[in-house]
Image: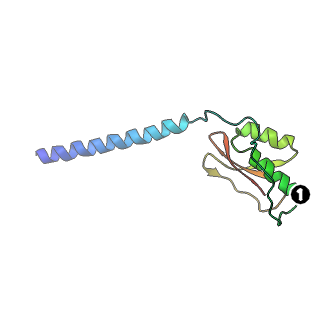
Amino acid sequence: MPAKATVVVGALGVLAASIAFVLGLIAGANNAMVSNPRSEPAPYCFEDPATDQFSQKHVQTKIVACQVMGMTKAEAISYIEAKKLSYRIASEDGESFALTEDYTDSRINLDILVGLVVGATAW
C-alpha cells in the first residue's frame, strides 16, 4: 500500500505543478507591458544602397519602417500617417492576419507585440 500512496501523491504533485505553470503563463501574458517604448523615430536608419530598389518612394518608405521600430502601436501609426504613408497590421500578439499580395511602395506592414512595434517592412 505505501507504493500506491507514493504514486498518488506524486501524480497530485505533478498535476498541481502543471496547473500552477499554466496559471503563471496566463497571468504573465495578461500583465505583460513594455517599460521603455521609443517615442521618437529611430536615429540609426539609413537609405538602402541596393541598386534594385523599386522606386525612390520605396527607399523613403523603408526608412520610415525602420524609424517606427520600438514605438508603441499608436505612436507608430501617427508617425506613418504624418509621413503620408499607409500601413497595415500584419500580426498582433502572435496572431497573423491575411494580407493581399498587391505591391505599393508607400505601405508599411507592422508586427505588434504587447502594443509595441517589433517588426516593420515596406511592401
- Which quadrant of the figure contains the C terminus? bottom right
Q: Position of residue 99 (x, y in %)?
A: 73, 57
- For label 1, count other residues whose C-alpha is less than 10 Å away and answer few (under 14), some (14-19) or many (20+): few
Q: Is residue 52 above or below residue 29?
A: below
Q: Is residue 103 above or below residue 11?
A: below
Q: Nearer the viewer, residue 50 or 53?
A: 50
Q: Nearer the viewer, residue 65 or 5?
A: 65
Q: Position of residue 70 (x, y in %)?
A: 68, 42
Does 40 sit left or right of 8 as displayed?
right
- What residue is rendered at 80% in x and 50% in y? 63
Q: Is residue 39 above or below residue 122?
A: above
- What residue is rendered at 88% in x and 45% in y? 84
Q: Which residue is mark 1?
A: 56
Q: How is the image coloured?
A: rainbow
Q: Residue furthest left?
A: 1
- Identify which amino acid the numbered label 1 is placed on: Gln
- What residue is rendered at 78% in x and 41% in y? 77
